[in-house]
């Protein structure tokens, strides 16, 4: 039970309640209200695992505030770091201004600060002064873009993977669990749940398998830009060959939504524009401030 002079209702703190339908439904209702997202299909498909944990305040059995953690590993310049990504930070509009998110943040940081090397999160521009209170520091990300003139392969055969297929879901699960990191500069591993959340709810029409490359490729063509979100493979892939396999006659640019190791010298990079979410980091080691990185978009909690 939780109450003090700043809170005029009696609260309970609950956590790791994904298998409690009443609390899960209430969490989903708040997530839909605040962010327009719902985690139920992800749960029903079996991919809301023990590496995504909600910490919530409830009032009368209703979730009114939440901070979630996603456990994963980061590969930074070839070194594996234990990481916690904080996400789904939300408070019901009727209970804002009472410090509930701050209390949950402190609770989560106290629990995990001895067990991980780095915390990170993404925040929109309206809360830039909130996270530095907890020792987080803003960190610039880079966008990697390549002007590309494809030579499409006539024998290209990509198979679209469907989340409605149990066989395809199981295939994706096995591939992601045994994947080679997409980058030694900066990549995420042990993040099966997050990958499958995006596969099911965000990019269900954009996931393909190339048998020739033995790789899952997540991409979308928008106008003259091919947005490449992820490549999942158990071995090192030939990036140029994959780009030629997925590009078409309309493709003029490749936009990478991760940090590519094989990016050609002629590729351009720029700091992420000020309109997007900002990366915040709290680490127990020194992270080079001008490091050119892009956190894989399929790993955003």
Image: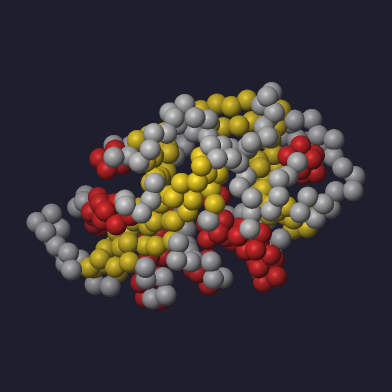
Which corner quadrant of the image does residue 95 belong to? bottom left
Q: Position of residue 57 (x, y in %)?
A: 27, 63
How many numbered marks have been drawn onto this rendered protein structure? 0
Q: Is residue 62 left or right of residue 252?
A: left
Q: Position of residue 230 (x, y in %)?
A: 64, 47
Q: Is residue 257 left or right of residue 82?
A: right
Furthest residue in direction right, as rendered: 154
Q: Residue at x 65, y 66 (%)?
A: 169
Viewer-side residue, 100 vs 175: 175
The answer, for residue 85, to whether it is visible in the render is: no
Q: Is residue 24 left or right of residue 148?
A: left
The answer, for residue 179, to whether it is visible in the render is: yes
Furthest residue in direction top, as rendered: 266
Residue 22 against residue 101 in the figure, above or below: below
Q: Residue at x 63, y 58 (%)?
A: 178
Q: Residue at x 25, y 40 (%)?
A: 133
Q: Residue at x 44, y 61 (%)?
A: 52
Q: Quadrant of the N terminus?
A: bottom left
Viewer-side residue, 293 vs 43: 293
Furthest residue in direction front, as rendered: 79
Colour convention of the picture: secondary structure
Q: Position of residue 87 (x, y in %)?
A: 40, 52
Q: Position of residue 60 (x, y in %)?
A: 24, 72
């Amino acid at each position: 039970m939780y109450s003090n002079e700043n809170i005029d209702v009696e609260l309970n703190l609950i956590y790791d309640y994904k298998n409690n339908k009443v609390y899960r439904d209430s969490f989903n209702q708040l997530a839909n209200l605040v962010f327009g997202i719902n985690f139920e299909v992800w749960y029903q498909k079996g991919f809301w695992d023990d590496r995504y944990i909600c910490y919530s305040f409830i009032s009368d059995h209703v979730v009114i505030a939440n901070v979630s953690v996603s456990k994963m590993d980061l590969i930074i310049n070839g070194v594996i770091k234990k990481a916690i990504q904080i996400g789904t930070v939300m408070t019901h509009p009727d209970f804002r201004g009472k410090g509930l998110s701050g209390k949950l943040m402190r609770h989560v940081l106290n629990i995990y600060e001895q067990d991980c090397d780095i915390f990170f999160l993404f925040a929109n521009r309206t809360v830039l002064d909130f996270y530095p209170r907890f020792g987080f520091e803003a960190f610039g990300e880079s966008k990697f873009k390549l002007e590309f003139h494809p030579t499409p392969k006539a024998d290209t055969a990509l198979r679209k993977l469907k989340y409605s297929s149990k066989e395809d879901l199981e295939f994706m699960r096995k591939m992601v669990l045994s994947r080679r990191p997409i980058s030694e500069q900066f990549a995420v591993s042990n993040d099966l749940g997050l990958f499958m959340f995006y596969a099911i709810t965000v990019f269900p029409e954009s996931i393909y398998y190339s048998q020739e490359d033995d790789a899952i490729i997540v991409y979308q063509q928008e106008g003259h830009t091919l947005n490449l979100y992820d490549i999942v493979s158990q071995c090192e892939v030939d990036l140029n060959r994959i780009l030629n396999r997925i590009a078409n006659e309309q493709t003029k640019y490749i936009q990478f939504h991760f940090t590519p190791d094989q990016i050609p010298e002629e590729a351009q990079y720029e700091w992420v524009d000020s309109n997007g979410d900002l990366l915040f980091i709290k680490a127990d080691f020194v992270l080079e401030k001008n490091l050119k990185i892009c956190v894989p978009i399929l790993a955003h909690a």
